[in-house]
Image: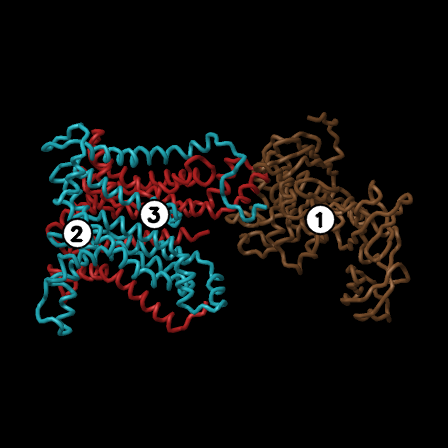
Chain colours: A cyan, B red, C brown
Amino acid sequence: MSAALSFTAVEHQRRGKGFWATFLPPFLWMAGFYLVPLAVLLSLAFQKHEYVHIIQEFTWENFATALSPAYRPALIRTLYVASAVTLVDMVIALPAAYFLAFHAGRWKTLLTVLILLPLWSSYLVRVFAWRIILGKAGILNWVLIKAGILDAPSPMFVYNLFSMGLTLCYIWLPFMILPLVTAFERLPRNLLEASSDLGADGFATFRRVTLPLVMPGLLAGSLSVFSLTSGDYLTPALIGGPGDSLVGNIIAGQFGVASNYPLGSAISALVLAVLFVLMAILAKKRVLESF
Amino acid sequence: MRQSRTTKWILGFYTLGVFLFMHIPLAVIVLFSFSDKRVLALPIRGWTLDWYRQMLEDERLYTGLFNSLKVASTATLLATFLGTLGAFAVMRWKFFGRNVFRSAVVIPILLPGIVTGVAMLSFFGTAGIPLGLATVIIGHATFGFPVVFNMVNARLARLPRSLEEASADLGATPAQTFRRVIFPSIRSAIIAGALLAFTLSFDEIVVTIFLTGKDNTLPMEIYSRLRFGMTPEINAAVTAILTASAVLVLLSTWFSRKA
Amino acid sequence: MTVLPMPTTQFSVQLRGATKRYGITAAADAVTLDIRRGEFFTLLGSSGSGKTTTLRLIGGFEFPDEGRILINGRDVTSQPAHERNVHTVFQDYALFPHMNVFTNVAYACELKRLPREEIRKRVNRAISLVQLEGLDRRKPSQLSGGQQQRVALARALVDEPAVLLLDEPLSALDAKIRTEVREELKALQRNTGITFIYVTHDQEEALTLSDRVAVMRNGRVVQVDTPIQLYEYPANLFVASFIGKANFLPGLLLSLDGKKAQVRVSEGVVEGRITSEIPVGARVRVMIRPENIRLMPGNSRVTVKQTTYLGHSTEYILSSGKQTLRALEIRRLGSTPHPVGTELPCGWNWEDALVYEDDGSVLTF
């Protein structure tokens, strides 16, 4: 009878006061404080900007500027960096997530929480830590000198694409690990046994059975990392090189000193468009339910 | 599935490596908070607790701390309220757009903070709402809500419908069933979600930068100082926050495991 | 809308044309039942037969699209579950995980805000009824399956409901303790005198436990009768093949002499008792239960294909060349089972065989 049914929608209950009482507050909040602001942002993207004023006239010029050679390098750099970071994080996370889900046994939850603990600490601090490690007077240099590989401290490890990329990989890695661990956990073990029973060795089973089945989790993690990296402006500012700014920095600049909200909004709209397209593609593949 | 022990060991070492990768930067911070040098470089010659003392005497840090606590508690209360209600609405009733709503709830965490930040900034600007702690609270509550929602949602999904029916069967009205059967079962999920939302809010900087007025939260305070370089005092403050966050997250995990 | 008879108190539960649809299928289709006070009544059928839906209609977890439900003479059709004086033992027991045994059992009483002493008295009585003393403080997760079930029972009995609904309570138990619990349930029902409405797919359970059984199929009630009647006089082929084991010989109806029918089957002509109005020449099935086949001089000769020694009896699979028959012979001390390959004569008393019109509903195994 009800053995397999969970706390799901009860058909015979009329959608009365109970439903509206629980649905309206979160819905109104989301609509009012998230969707409406996004709409305002979008509308700003189409308005004219003159000096510090915003003129309510419809125009495409912001988008034109956003895609102009002045800003295009940053957009392309962002795509490239975000993709690279996503790939690197994917490679780092997969074996670890596999280990946690399959070989950690009783310690799985504890280990997962411990590995993910840095996620809950201050973002600033995590970036700054890498400055300390990679800096000219930093730990990496100290180790390399002690090991005899370097004669003098080198500034080449920090304030460039390398340090920015490394830090980005570090910061957003937990967002790849988490959905992957969940996906591996949900894998029915008997499928793997069936596969080896039918003659597949470890690698073949991984390629033919495990990987396809954890793909939704992998895609969910990739979407998160890609999205969060694209918009990251603090890491480039704190540990990137002078010419390494990402689209997030440009947006932040337009909303800060440059005070050109329409341009900033237009660039944001472009970023959003790309992300929403990705989300829509993945939603079709039912990936969003992996969160 | 039988895998060779070598595979298991290799994977184990690899995972240890990932673990170290995740924690070494933090260890560095903690380490240097005890170093007696002003410059954050190796080698460390002497150990001291001076920076912690300095931290405790720093008034602006205290103000920042109080503001952070104010913001985090209010935002968490809001997020818990909204998240719990939302999880209920989605789990209990079939309604038009239910799946869309469920997927939409995740978006504030999925989109980069800058988008949330500038969108809200534009909105508050257009609506004439002055920036201050209130706007920060609104921002934090908006992404605290999905965190609580997910926790409560997951727990509700594991609650067998037969429990609710059994309660009604024995004579309980829907209100009584909620109070005596449903709520006790989800209570720990709510607490776990609230703790996580609190931690997130407490550490938040990305969105907060766009939404603060003249009152700084603790991360904002630290950020403004970091512009001038990292000081050991900041190290100390951050180590303290780190410890507190770790405790909260471990507590949250413990609560979420209570069936 | 039929005119209801005056409410009678002889019946605990009555359903009048209760129908529940999901989409276009009727999970329960015009179900009409009269269940007597103090009766052990079973709804028997395979999955999808509508037995669980019917139970849930009585319990108040679903509302019928058509028809009425009466409990002790009162129309409760529109009453939700918590207002009906009917309690359910759920298949997964549905014990409240955050309460211990005592609080679980006391639940219904606490809702009624009975005084502490009264609650304690009732709970202790319920617990001793199901023989579960001493575990008051344990949480459900610390109990075995059998113990959990007893708690579920005690919880449902604590405030003496008019009717107890049981949804396949034995299915989650080990086969070993199933017979034990079965007997305890029967004793419990007799002691308390509460009307039990029991749902199961296991026909052996139904026959051993019940005063009366309703066989259901595709949402409809096919036959309501005592176990003996169901076994010896099944109303149609479906019930006949669902209950107990039987042989079904296909054939053509040759002639009728009162109740005695002559049927041409592949081996020749056999006799049986007609069960309904069947025209001569129609296709029929002759049902003969294994224990009624006599290995004595009679119509046909058969060869033993398989012998299964069951201790108290021997089961034979016999072949006539064109048909396979299953026969059961009670063992007598000293006699040995016929070995495979033996040729034997076989037949039966005509009153022991039933002739049904062949409507294609014989369940094949």
Secondary element at image label 3: helix
Which tag is nearer the camera, tag 2 or tag 3? 2
> Which residue is disc 1 drawn over?
C188
Image coordinates of residue B190 in percent, x first then y, are 40, 45
Q: Viewer-proximal residue, B8 or B144?
A: B8
> Which residue is disc 3 drawn over?
B195
> Which residue is disc 2 drawn over?
A236
Disc 2 crowd, CA 10 A, few/some/many (<14, 14-19, 20+) = many
Amino acid of disc 1: Leu
Q: Chain of mark 3?
A: B
Mark 2–mark 1 Cα distance, whole angstroms, equals: 75 Å
Amino acid of disc 2: Pro
- The residue located at (35%, 41%) in the rendering is B105
Image coordinates of residue A119 in percent, x first then y, are 28, 53
Disc 3 crowd, CA 10 A, few/some/many (<14, 14-19, 20+) = many
| Mark 2 vs 3: CB contact within 8 A | no
Q: Is residue A184 above or below residue B112?
A: below
Secondary element at image label 2: helix
Q: Viewer-proximal residue, C71 or C119?
A: C71
Residue A84 appears in which quarter of the rendering?
bottom left
- The residue located at (27%, 64%) in the rendering is B20
User: Can residue C233 be seen here?
Assistant: yes
Image coordinates of residue C201 in percent, x first then y, are 67, 50
- The residue located at (66%, 58%) in the rendering is C177
Amino acid of disc 3: Leu
Which tag is nearer the camera, tag 2 or tag 1? 2
Image coordinates of residue A44 in percent, x first then y, are 20, 33
Mark 1–mark 3 Cα distance, whole angstroms, equals: 49 Å
